[in-house]
Amino acid sequence: MLQIKEPDYEKIISYAKEHLPEEACGLVAGCLDGGVKKIKKIYFLTNTDKSSTHYFMDINEQLAAVRDMRKHGLALLGSWHSHPDSPAGFSEEDRRLAYDSSISYLILSLMHRDEPQFKSYTISREKEVTEEPVILEKCETNS
Ligand SMILES: [Zn+2]
């Protein structure tokens, strides 16, 4: 199970929309709390493929993000990318690129621009893909 704060989720959507028609991508970090992956920080990385159907995260930015996580005591929880014109399913390409059974793979579909779809998956060492529930955490407001 994966938990993300609503403002962080909104940030991913706006960033991904700004980068249309290309796929946008990045990493998420946070902590594991009783089996729940709680996202505390989102990293926005350059898609060096500059493609609407593929992504590759800039290597130097990946290293910088991981260093930043260490600095803040956060664990790498997953990677995310957008699907500009297809559903939030795990594509064959996504399966090919997924190699880490310890993290989540988050996919944001912008196929319906005003109704983004957000899904999270894990992949086993045998490359079996499982969807995992995503909880949108609403923030309390004092106003
Ligand atoms: Zn994909």
Image (cartoon, rainbow, N blue to C red):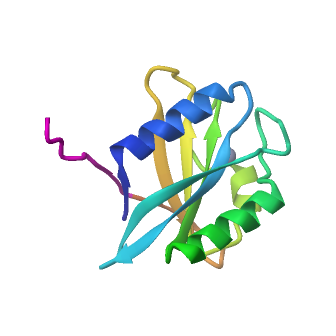
Number of disc labels: 0
* Magenta stretch holds residue 39: no
On screen, residue 131 versus residue 124, left or right, reads: left
Q: Is residue 52 left or right of residue 106?
A: right
The dominant secondary structure in magenta is loop
Q: Say which residue appears at 63% left-offset and 26% top-offset.
A: 18
- Look at the image and tell me in which quarter the N terminus lies: bottom left
Choose top left, top right, bottom left or bottom right for residue 22: top right
Where's residue 54, x and y in %?
78, 43
Q: Relative to 74, does residue 15 appear above or below in the rendering?
A: above
Vertical placement of 11 versus 76: above or below? above
**Does 140 lie within the magenta span?**
yes
Q: Nearer the viewer, residue 34 or 139?
A: 139
Image-quadrant location for residue 62: bottom right
Residue at far left of view: 143
Q: Residue at x 25, y 45 (%)?
A: 138
Specify the quadrant that holds the C terminus.
Answer: top left
User: 116 or 8: which is nearer to us?
Assistant: 8
Quadrant in the picture for residue 47 = top right
In this picture, which residue range is highlighted in magenta? Answer: 133-143
In the image, is residue 116 above or below residue 91? above
Taking 94 as reference, is 136 left or right? left
Provide residue 58's location: percent of width, then percent of height.
Answer: 81, 54
The single residue placed furthest to the right in the displayed view is 49
Residue 25 percent coordinates (x, y): 67, 47
* Whole-percent x, y for residue 35 in the image: 34, 77
> In the depicted view, which residue is nearer to us: 117 or 57?
57
- Residue 72 visible to an observer of this rendering: yes
Query: Can residue 88 be spotted in the picture?
Result: no
